Image (cartoon, helix red, strand yellow):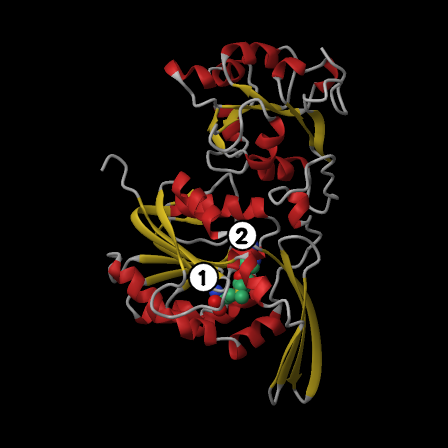
Amino acid sequence: MKPAGGQSPEADVVKQEVVRGSDGRVIIVDSITQLAADDAGAIVVCGSHGGTSAGTFALAVPLAAVFFNDGGVGKDDAGIAALDMLQARGVPAGTVAHTSARIGDAQDAWDHGVVSHVNAAARALGFAPGDLLSVVLAKRVMRRGDPFAAQGAATDAATPAASGPSTRQDPYYLPDLAWVHHVGYGHHVERVHSAIVDLLRGAGVAAGARVLDVGCGSGLLARELVAAGFEVHGIDASPAMIDLAREYAPTATFEVLPLPARAAAEVRRDPPISGDAGLPVADAIVSTGHVLNYLDSREEIAVALAQLARALLPSGVIAIELMTEAYCRARDAVPVHAKVEDDWAIVTRFSRPAPFRYDRDITTFRRVDGQWRRSDEHHRNVTFEADEAVRILRENGIDAEVRSSFGKESLPAGLAVVAGTRRVEGA
Ligand SMILES: C[S@@+](CC[C@H](N)C(=O)[O-])C[C@H]1O[C@@H](n2cnc3c(N)ncnc32)[C@H](O)[C@@H]1O
């Protein structure tokens, strides 16, 4: 066995620690045969298949959890047989899909691996098929506020480092900006709402069906959807937005629920409740204002897309707007946006601090009780390609496609709509 830590002496064999936090550490290793005694207690992501021989090697060292490649699962589930062996010893274990990461390539499993199978012990910890493994593991070992300690991970587009660690503590859209968005930026919903209603009706979503409005903001779209006869439930990370939405669209229901939703209670079938809950199931899921691009990394966006796909009922319809790289390219020449009204003003400065990032420093001024009040927010957006979103939705049971808009309206260059219908199992 080789020593733990650092690169293996064989140049081609990866073995390294990628994340360390207050709640543990993650080691990636191309082959499970490379485990050493001082790997005890680590979470291991390996490139090996999850067959019985791999299970035997994994059991030789006490691990906090271990993830293999499912190798296509194969005859008699041989590619995931290790999961039961580890379960018998109480060790959480899972696999990533062979279609998401190359077998034998731990770095690929870390960068792109999507969980395909888990044993009961891993499920109890909140791991679920469809999760992007690195996001769930990084969250697991790091408490909120820990520095993101990814070491030696590749910095290509798909890694957490590429889209940047989050040090953000406040939700976006505190009360002043939420209000300015509500009174001054309704034109986008104005442009798309009837196309969304037509899209839903055209796909057979009937009046009375439950529509989940993701990142509903102040309820601008929810109110239109209610007027069209749908039962609307809005979720948003911003408490100030939800307060406005409850006032503006009082017959819809709303809750503060940031994406990605909690893995442990990912989808719930009960009526909306506030607090410690996952996503409610819905007949349709819509989202305007490139909400998913507000998540902290591409990995989180991928996880959120998979969660939304799983929250959709059979034959349900999803239509989500995304900000792609083309959107930022179209705006490279526009460094500042400003708008001035009688009792409010906004100045937005744009920047591209890292690949796939599109940030905004937003300053608002509001006149309240005769006094001007200034508020500042820094928004990080992470671009995401529509083709990749389609791939994730398809892997999670949605027949999805990229569209240039929700319907006949035209969207600003670089905004894309990803839309599709949930397949009916066995149909
Ligand atoms: C540009 S606004 C769009 C609001 C609304 N959909 C509209 O079109 O007017 C983006 C919204 O995404 C919400 N948001 C940002 N991050 C979120 C997250 N992680 N989960 C849920 N909502 C989020 C913000 O609070 C904000 O309301």
Where residue 203 appears, as percent x and y from the top left, is 26, 56
Q: Quadrant of residue 376?
A: bottom right
Q: Identify the residue at image location x=51%, y=43%.
A: 303
Asked whether disc 2 touches disc 1, contact meaning CB atoms under 8 Å apart, the reply is no
Above or below 363: residue 196: above
Q: What amino acid is labelled 1 in the image?
A: Phe
> Would residue 307 be found to the left or right of residue 342 on screen?
left
> Would residue 3 be found to the left or right of residue 34 on screen?
right
Q: CA distance from mark 2 to mark 1?
A: 26 Å
Which numbered disc covers residue 254? 1
Q: Identify the residue at image location x=67%, y=15%.
A: 34
Where residue 36 appears, as percent x and y from the top left, is 71, 14
**Count of numbered circles in the view:** 2
- How many neighbours does mark 1 have within 10 angstroms: few (below 14), some (14-19), or many (20 or more)? many
Q: Is mark 2 within 8 Å of ligand 1?
A: no
Above or below 52: residue 248: below
Q: What amino acid is labelled 2 in the image?
A: Phe
Question: Which residue is identified by label 2?
Answer: 384
